[in-house]
Amino acid sequence: MKKILFFLMFFLFLGSLGLAMTCRPPDLPPHPTAEQIMQHWFDIKFTRFVNDAVYNGVNLIMIDKSGYKREKKAVRKRIIMHGKNGFDYKDLIAITYPEYSKGLAVLNWAYMDINKQNDIWIWLPSMKKIRKVSQAEGDDSFMGTEFTVEEVTTRRYGYETYELLGEEIFKGYKAHYNKKIYYANTPCYKIKAVPKKNPWYYTYRIVWIDKNTGIDVYEEYYDKRGRKFKEIFHYFDTPKEGCWWARMWEVYNFRTGHSDTLLIEPGRYNSGLKERHFSPRILERQEW
């Protein structure tokens, strides 16, 4: 009897390890609704299938209308709180290059209750000052790029209403950074997302979700006159066996002719980050 109990406890222990150490999301359900599709995407975007994530190699390539390139480098860390003390996740992004902006950092605390505004702090190294900002400033530029703060760090499931427009073949995306074509002829769910905040910097966006992976591969942003003014592309490594990793995000602004590309090197999942690594005090200490 003791041996049976021992083996039962042993297999339960292995099962709990498997749950905690997973590094890929679950599959989409068959015939999903627009809400299920978007919930699944946001779970992937914020790596809710792991306990924490560390990206030490984030390269930002900024290309203006003339083709002139600038480069920044950053690190990103996230801990998934799984509802502890009402939190969804805590996220930290810090610039490590070039020298003149090194140390600029954004800390974001997201709550399970989407009606509760995120707590967001920015560390300004030149002033040696922490500034707490309002989530209402989510349409501000993210670190000088064409991405907004909302697009990178704060937008979550439930900030919009969703409508499934149907299924369609995505013809592919030609990246501004390297001119390669990604996701050519990919079967996708096509979803219209309308922000609940009104007025907001976009009136609606059209989102293309890969049917096989549930990844948001492409987004189109439209203004109140129905004009497309921005596109965002996401590329992920999704091996049949092994961990899924975001590898490239790219934004292009049709109004300015500027594009920005985030190139992300695979990092570490489930490395044992603690909640104390995501406090405003950490920003002052520049411990990343």
Image (cartoon, rainbow, N blue to C red):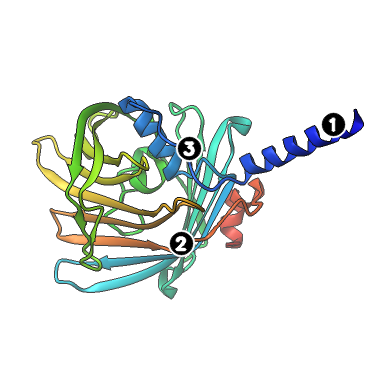
Location of the N terminus by quadrant is: top right
* Res. 157 image quadrant: top left
Which residue in the structure is indicated by mark 1? 4
Q: Earlier in the sequence, mark 3 or mark 1?
A: 1
The amino acid on which the numbered mark 1 sits, given as a three-letter code, is Ile
Residue sitting at x 8%, y 36%: 225
Side (left or right) of 90 relative to 261: right
Say which of 251 and 237 sits in front.
237
Which residue in the structure is indicated by mark 2? 104
Residue 217, horizontal then vertical, whole percent: 29, 47
Q: Nearer the viewer, mark 3 or mark 1?
A: 1
Residue 235, horizontal then vertical, whole percent: 33, 54
Whole-angstrom CA distance, mark 3 to mark 1, is: 31 Å
The amino acid on which the numbered mark 3 sits, given as a three-letter code, is Pro
Say which of 16 and 230 sits in front.
16
Q: Earlier in the sequence, mark 3 or mark 2?
A: 3
Which residue in the structure is indicated by mark 3? 26
Residue 164, horizontal then vertical, whole percent: 24, 27
Neighbour tally class for label 2: few under 14, some 14-19, many 20 plus, Cα within 10 Å: many
Location of the C terminus by quadrant is: bottom right
Say which of 102 and 7 sits in front.
7
Residue 158 is at least partly visible in this image: no
Residue sitting at x 24%, y 68%: 178
Element at label 3? loop
Side (left or right) of 148 relative to 205: right
Whole-angstrom CA distance, mark 3 to mark 2, is: 35 Å
Say which of 125 and 40 sits in front.
40
